[in-house]
Image (cartoon, helix red, strand yellow):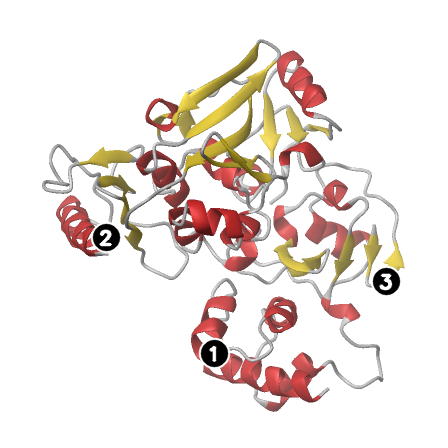
């Protein structure tokens, strides 16, 4: 398995990166590559251009902003997991990160990359949603801030435009209890179902085409989970009830 | 880029995966290629000291970075690295296909956790698959490697 032919670009600044994304057709942003490179190896993705943002030092920071914490696009999941500021201000994020794949994957994978990838079973997407966080997207047309509730559209689909670079994610400071729980067939696998809680807000993941906010008193209302050989819709609904009970007790 | 302390030329083809670059261009075939999508862990190497999947990196991305592969753990004829020694003593391998990945993941893990608990060991090697041993001897090997590393 080898990636298809593409042209490789390693911009040295965010400005250069967005000008590449604005001028190239069929370009994909390469961050940690822990989802994109498998897609290339399987040839499920065939971008004509890869814009590698790993050399953009301006996107490697975790810092206080607007009463919360901003995480740059090249911050590795393993860095965020042990970051003192995030642990203090947004403790849900380190908890969620511990459930993302395996430690070796988290050494390379990025927080923002997981958000941009928008996998329906992603713990980080659910964390952004339940915390009412937001992301910043930049393009040659300017900068826009997108609330989590407006960001996720469907399976691996967000409102990011092809010429936009997700430069950072922002998580508000949280008070009150936080918890996240999921059920996967093996340690580190994608979750069959999961629940994340921040105070009295609840988000579910792995049970629809995108993360959903849910009512803690009636979390399965309106859910129509898909059927798969390893997990029937009824079993998924059962998992949701059990996991929600667990996170609400935390 | 520097591989096991030696300066190496940059890769020219952007499609070249780092795992293939190490094996085919540098002849360092100790890094094994199993699944090529980041699941099996056989191709784990150290990238600036941290374990990563070399099948999920492009070789061009290694420009300016320092890599370590299983070949760098010990010189031929020299004593084995404590982690290799532990895997040998505790029968932490049978066919050996997954072993380079386990060794590199363990080397990095013990630097961070010199005296790990059983739960920490299980978490550290959860991203590496072995179809022979059933993992019991591998967990034993990691514990023994921690002892040997502390003595070294």
Q: Position of residue A186 (x, y in %)?
A: 36, 61
When the figure is inspected, residue A78 is found, relative to residue B129, above or below; the finding is above
**Pointer 2 residue:** A247
Q: Name the secondary structure under disc 1.
A: loop
A39 over B42 or under it: above or below = above
Q: Is residue A151 visible?
A: yes
Q: Which mark is residue B117?
A: 1
Closer to the camera: disc 3 or disc 2?
2
Which of the two marks, 1 or 3, is nearer to us in this view? Answer: 1
Residue A49 position (above or below residue A61): above
Q: Position of residue A110 (x, y in %)?
A: 55, 42
Mark 2 is surrounded, within 10 Å at the Cα level, by few (under 14), some (14 to 19) or many (20 or more) other residues, namely many
Q: Chain of mark 1?
A: B
Q: What chain letter is assigned to the residue under label 2?
A: A
In the rendering, at what x and y percent does residue B119 appear?
43, 74
Quadrant showing the C terminus of chain B: bottom right
Picture disc at residue B129: none
Residue B108 sits in which quadrant? bottom right
Residue that numbered label 3 is attached to: B5
């Amino acid at each position: 398995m080898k990636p298809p032919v593409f042209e490789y670009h390693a911009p040295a600044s965010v400005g250069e990166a967005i000008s590449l994304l604005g001028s190239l057709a069929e370009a994909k942003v390469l961050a940690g590559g822990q989802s994109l490179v498998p897609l290339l190896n399987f040839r499920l993705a065939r971008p004509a251009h890869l814009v590698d943002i790993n050399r953009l030092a301006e996107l490697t920071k975790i810092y206080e902003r607007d009463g919360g914490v901003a995480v740059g696009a090249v911050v590795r999941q393993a860095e965020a997991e042990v970051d003192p500021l995030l642990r203090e201000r947004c403790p849900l994020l380190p908890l969620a990160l511990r459930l993302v794949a395996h430690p070796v994957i988290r050494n390379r994978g990025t927080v923002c990359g997981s958000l941009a990838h928008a996998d329906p079973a992603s713990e980080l997407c659910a964390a952004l949603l339940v915390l009412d966080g937001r992301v910043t997207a930049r393009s040659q047309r300017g900068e826009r801030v997108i609330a989590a509730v407006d960001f996720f559209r469907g399976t691996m689909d967000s409102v990011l435009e092809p010429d936009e670079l997700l430069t950072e994610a922002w998580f508000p400071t949280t008070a009150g209890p936080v918890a996240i729980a999921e059920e996967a067939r093996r340690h580190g696998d994608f979750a069959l179902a999961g629940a994340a809680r921040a105070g009295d807000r609840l988000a579910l993941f792995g049970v629809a085409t995108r993360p959903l906010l849910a009512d803690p008193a009636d979390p399965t209302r309106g859910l129509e989970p898909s059927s798969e050989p390893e997990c029937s819709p009824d079993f998924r609904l059962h998992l949701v009830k059990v996991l929600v009970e667990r996170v609400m007790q935390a | 880029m520097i591989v096991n302390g030696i300066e190496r030329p940059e890769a020219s083809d952007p499609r070249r995966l780092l795992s293939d670059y190490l094996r085919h261009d540098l002849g360092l075939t100790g890094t094994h290629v199993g699944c090529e999508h980041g699941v099996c862990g056989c191709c784990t190497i150290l990238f600036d000291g941290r374990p990563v999947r070399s099948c999920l990196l492009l070789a061009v991305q290694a420009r300016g970075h320092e890599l370590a592969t299983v070949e760098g753990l010990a010189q031929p004829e020299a004593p084995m690295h404590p982690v290799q020694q532990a895997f040998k003593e505790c029968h932490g391998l049978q066919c050996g296909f997954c072993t380079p990945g386990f060794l590199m993941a363990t080397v990095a893990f013990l630097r961070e956790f010199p005296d790990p608990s059983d739960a920490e060991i299980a978490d550290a090697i959860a991203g590496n698959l072995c179809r022979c041993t059933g993992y019991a001897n591998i967990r034993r090997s990691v514990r023994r490697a921690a002892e040997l590393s502390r003595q070294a």
